[in-house]
Every structure is written in C-alpha cells, then in structure tokens.
Amino acid sequence: MPQPDQVHPDRDVLGAGAPTNTAAAAAVVRIHPRAAWRNVGGEVFVITGDRAFHRLAAPTAVDLIKRLAAAPATVSELAELLVRDYQVDAATACLDVTTFVDTLLAKQIATANEPTGGRL
C-alpha cells in the first residue's frame, strides 16, 4: 500500500503528497467557482483563481472532473463511478477518490461543503 506521500503511478493525477482532509469524505464536492476547465483531446486543462494551470490526463481523473462539472457529488458517489466504470474494488476507489478530492481542494480546483451546508 502506498504511503501518504507516495501515490501509485497509475493513480497519480495531480502529484503525490496531497494533504489528507478527512472532512472531505462526507463533503459535497463541486468544481471551484473560480476554476475554468476544458476537455481537449481526452485531457482536462484547468486554470484556477490563482492563475495556476493544471493538466489531468488520466482517464479516471478526466471522468471524475466531468462528473463534478455535471453536478456536485460526494466521495462515495465518485467512488461508485470508479467501481462501475473501471472495475476497481470499493475500498481502493474510496481511497483513491479521497486522495484525488483532497488534491483538488488543495489546488483550488474544487470546493467542498459539509452535508449540513457549512463551508470546509
């Protein structure tokens, strides 16, 4: 199993060492309102409010971003997408999506609200 600062190369979409935010697991995640993204040639390019540029090339990352752009989702809902479309077990999907969401939050690509509606 990878250590928190080591992500499996096939799952590394935005870089290893993303912070772990346990509140994100129960949160409703959405694309950050100050982030602009485009899907070009099967890759997603994002410019965030701080003018940072991000490229997501992994098919799973692209699918998760497209899902978030369509409607806010919880980590569980995003993990279900991976289980359904990529035949990965639920525990692995949940761990990978949690890491992915933590990274999106840290890089200001996404925001998250607690289920009760409070800001994280």
Image (tube, rainbow, N blue to C red):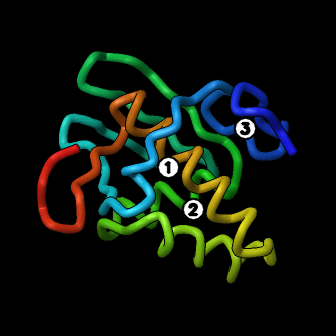
**Element at badge 1?**
strand
Marks 3 and 2, how far apart at CA: 14 Å
Provide the residue designation for mark 2. 63
**Element at badge 3?**
loop
Residue 12's disc is 3
Q: Which of labels 2 and 1 is toward the front?
A: 2
Amino acid on which the number 1 mark rests in the picture: Asn
Foreground residue among 112 and 34? 112
Q: Residues within 10 Å of mark 2 (few under 14, many from 20)?
A: some
Q: Which of labels 1 and 3 is toward the front?
A: 3
Residue depicted at 12% across the width and 62% down the height: 117
Question: Quick one: label 1 or label 3, which is nearer the N terminus?
Answer: 3
Q: Position of residue 70 (x, y in %)?
A: 34, 68
State which quadrant residue 107 falls in. top left
Q: Quadrant of the N terminus?
A: top right
Q: Which of labels 3 and 2 is toward the front?
A: 3
Confirm or deny contact between disc 2 and disc 1 (CB under 8 A).
no
